[in-house]
Amino acid sequence: MLALELANRFRRARTQQRFISFISMSSTVGIGLGCFVLIVLLSVMNGFERELTGRILSVVPHGELFSVDERGIENLDAQLYRFKQDERIKQVTPYTKLTGMLQFKGNLKAISITGVPITQNNTFLQRSIMPADWQALNNTPDGLIVGKGIAQKLGLKQGDIVQTLIPQRTSDLTFKAPSTISLTVVGILSVGGELDNQLGVMHLQKASEALKLTSNAQGIQFTFHDPFTANSVMREIGYSFPQAVYMSDWTRTQGHLYNDIQLVRVVVYIALTLVIAVACFNIVSSLVMAVREKQAAIAILKTMGATDALIRKAFVYQGIINGIIGVSTGVALALLVAPNLSDIVGFIEQITGVEVLSGDIYFIDFLPSELHLTDVLMTIVVALFLSVAATLYPAHKATKVAPSSALH
């Protein structure tokens, strides 16, 4: 194609102004750098979303129903059977939750203990508990598994006997001495982040007896096949439940993490798209100056019969080539770095001794990354579109060159 050949000759021709070459090169580097950083950061956001779904939502129930009064869930077995028939629900688990203070050797630590049927396959808890600890809890009626942060705070180890202080509610809102139950630590639960400083697991029957429930459980926990439907499904279940219950879902307790990830994703995409746009504006500058420098060549081409369409295509192709080089370089580097980002950051942490993510603060202690093909394609399309748009004005200016004045 003649227009493409002209574009290549214009690019390879030795320019009289090195400044034009510098701007052209900087635009290519800017586009490549913008594409590289955008894809890598979007991969990091994808990694955080994956870890949120795989870690936090594996130990936090997707939804909960719990009784308003002290009776607990009535007709528990019938309700469990009904929910198991719902195809949207992956698992239902009766539970009783105790919120109080854990006492050991004079030290106190707030804790939220969930009583569950240990013999049931509790997937949202067992993934973060060692099988041996889970078996030990099954064999110990008064057993307790505590979060890693609680164990470190109180200096707990397996076999220690702790006192759990549970506040007592009264109908006239007067103060009453808390009830106390003795539990034996049989294992450690490790989820990550603040949950390690709050969670505990014990037998359902023991927890229900401690709260003096008239039924076998205070509430029901739900695990859905699609966690992101939890809000709407829980509303439907709660409104149709035959007794007065409170309802909750993970978006109320842990949803801020997911919202933060989505907000950062949007901000990153907008900011780096603007970086790519600025780099593309350099294409405008370099091509405008190239048109002024090559007025004589354009005039000669016109006198030889070149049409305005041919001249326009030649400069459009010249800008597109710069864009393609930048995009392909940036995408290639991103495809190399993004899948291995966790290992790269881990290696840098070992060398520098600086911890990027602390497991005591965040729910993970490494930088996750997950490359999505859609993010790569979207970045390529946006960058190429901006590159093409940046060539339109300079190409139009090239067609306005008058041979008579340019060759004068």
Image (cartoon, grey):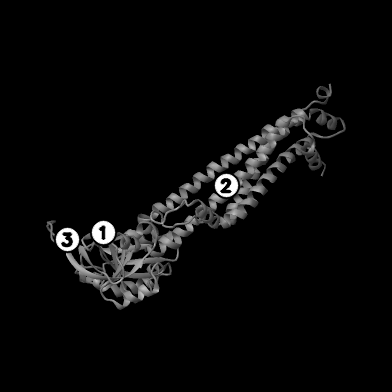
Q: First in sequence, mark 2 or 1: give its number.
A: 2
Q: Nearer the viewer, residue 190 or 313?
A: 190
User: Above or below — where is 145 with respect to 273?
Assistant: below
Q: Which quadrant: the N terminus?
A: top right
Classify residue 385 as left or right of residue 120: right
Q: Which residue is mark 2?
A: 37
Amino acid carrying label 1: it is Lys
Look at the numbered discs 3 and 1 and tell me whether their residues touch, using CB distance below 8 Å. Answer: no
Q: First in sequence, mark 2 or 3: give its number.
A: 2
Find residue 275 and report its horizontal and vertical position in percent. 58, 40
Amino acid carrying label 3: it is Arg
Q: Which residue is mark 1?
A: 109
Q: CA distance from mark 3 to mark 1?
A: 20 Å
Q: Residue furthest bottom?
A: 139
- Give the residue drawn at x 49%, y 44%: 267
Amino acid carrying label 2: it is Val
Find residue 171 and report its horizontal and vertical position in percent. 13, 59
State which quadrant residue 15 falls in: top right
The answer to whether residue 75 is seen in the rendering is no
Q: CA distance from mark 2 to mark 3?
A: 55 Å
Q: Nearer the viewer, residue 332 or 285?
A: 332
